[in-house]
Image: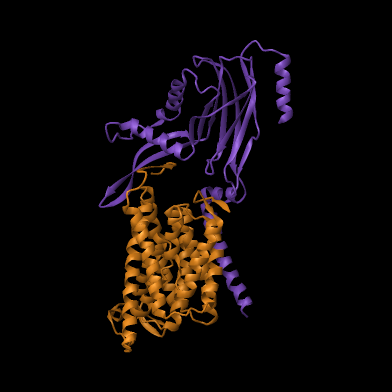
Chain colours: A orange, B purple
Amino acid sequence: MQIFLPIADVPVDLFVLLVLGAAVGFLSGVFGIGGGFLMTPLLILLGIPAAVAVATEANQIAASSFSGVLAHLKRRAVDFKMGNILVVGGLLGSAVGVEVFRIIKSYGQIELFVSLCYILFLGSIGTLMFLESLSTIQKSRKSENTFKQKKKHNWIHGLPFKTKFKSSNLYISAIPPVIIGFIIGILASIMGVGGGFILIPAMIYILGMPTKVVIGTSLYQIMFITAFTTFMHATQNKTVDLLLALILIVGGVLGAQLGARVTVKLKAEEIRILLAIIVLLVCLKLALDLMITPNDLFSITYGSGS
Amino acid sequence: MRALIFAIIFIFSTAPFSLSSVISDIDKSNIELSTRFDGTSILVFGALSPENDSTSLLIEIIGPSTSVNIRKKVQIWGIWVNKKIARFKDIPSFYQISISNPEHPVLIEIENQKLKSLFYDFLEANSTPEDVNGVEQYYLELTRLKKKLGKLSVFEEQVNIIDKKLFSHKVNLPKKIHPGIYKIKMTLIDQQGIELSKSEQSVKVSKVGVQEFLSHNSKNNPVFYGLFSVIIALFLGFSAAQLFRWLYR
């Protein structure tokens, strides 16, 4: 069934969008990832303008992360103080990111910019994930376990503005969380991702937070940042397509529930290799689209912009 | 509509006109762009007088004006980048012209004159010519791309004339059209292309329902629209959490 998206200004097949939302939701249920970094490029490949894909995806993540944060609140797995400091950095990052986005959009190069960000991002994440899973598989074959949690006492502890985080049982400076939050805000606003795949490792390895509060706290920050990013994109760039967001939310919720309940008969490393391959394929497609000589060198756009 | 056609036939068969004239009507005066809009067509019909072999009927459909940028992809460091090269200010977003007599002696002149006054003349002065063909090239690309998108059609379809006095013409509109007033102009011309009589109709194309609500508020009330989007998303997230908690209790 064809529907016409009011802000994206393109006709799309409703069924295709629902399936896409469900498929990415399913993957995020299985892999425990947000899915924004897959959904945004897939929307672009479907023909939705990059600016709309990014802003709308932020709106979808606001919904899914809120849903997730509620589950973690029940388990008291959210460090609010840490979350709030991350949010402060994130709001700043998001405001800066949306402004950068607006400027690049006014030059008519937002499609290129978003594509390049994704190629860089998916390329490096996919490669890292692929190599890491491969080496883990090889190590597990030799049946030696080299995973050791080092008690860290790194440069973080030398910074000023130290404060106590009760839920995380930490006494560290507020500067690193603000900076990490800021980076996540930038990523959310220019790429339409939640940023969990950066935030979670940063919380564990840089801040040294205990794993039990990491996911809840990251969802807490992501919810605020994507909600704010949605609002900023709506007011600065007018690129949030609520109809598209609604379809993706519905598809995504169903898919994620299925994904979380399906028993996957694969090892964790094998699942990760599979995800790495999907990520690299999307990256390759985006790169090829930029490099292959287009069929038609000329195109037209409407309105007063470029 | 049938009654109207009979009325037209009746009037024309009983009262012969001394001057050449054309009267017309259309099958709809409003087109609603809903989320389900999938293209549509407009039927234009009417009558001509007097019966004359030497006159031809031109039908033009002119959509609301928009500005159009022409972009060209150029290769920089191995990747293809869009570069804006020219801009046409306030040209019709849709234009179709058809004639009843495709062998009309001055067809080419009519085509050139119409396209020049509607498109060519609106190329902005600061569009810098890039190669020898310069301005001409931009104009050719504009018309080529518009034809490809189904938004420009020049003498591709013929106006049907029935019995030398009645005419009908179906105009197909693509899925993606700009809202606004679409003017339909019927012009009766002689062999030299001189205008003898004309008639004009208009169709209002507007967004409706969800389409209208979202695009209107996104443009005009961005603060409300932004808050609304966030609230809807959070509400759906909350509902999903509650729903699945209940389902898997």
Q: Is residue A95 above or below residue B150?
A: below
- Using the rendered view, name the quadrant where residue A14 is placed: bottom right
- Residue A142, image x, y percentages: 31, 87
Q: Is residue B125 above or below residue A254?
A: above
Q: Is residue A97 visible?
A: yes
Is A76 left, or right, of A44 in this rendering? right
Q: Is residue A182 visible?
A: no
Q: Residue at x 42, y 60 (%)?
A: A41
- Residue A238, image x, y percentages: 48, 52
Q: Residue at x 47, y 71 (%)?
A: A28
- Relative depth, front residue between A160 and B130: B130
> Is the N terminus of chain A in the top left, top right, bottom left or bottom right quadrant?
bottom right
- Residue B139, image x, y percentages: 38, 32
Residue found farthest to the left: B77
- Residue A153, image x, y percentages: 29, 85
Is A294 left, or right, of A52 in this rendering? left
Q: Is residue A209 above or below residue B10?
A: below
Q: Residue at x 64, y 20 (%)?
A: B165
Q: Residue at x 38, y 84 (%)?
A: A170
- Relative depth, front residue between A258 and B219: A258
Q: Is residue A198 above or below residue B44?
A: below
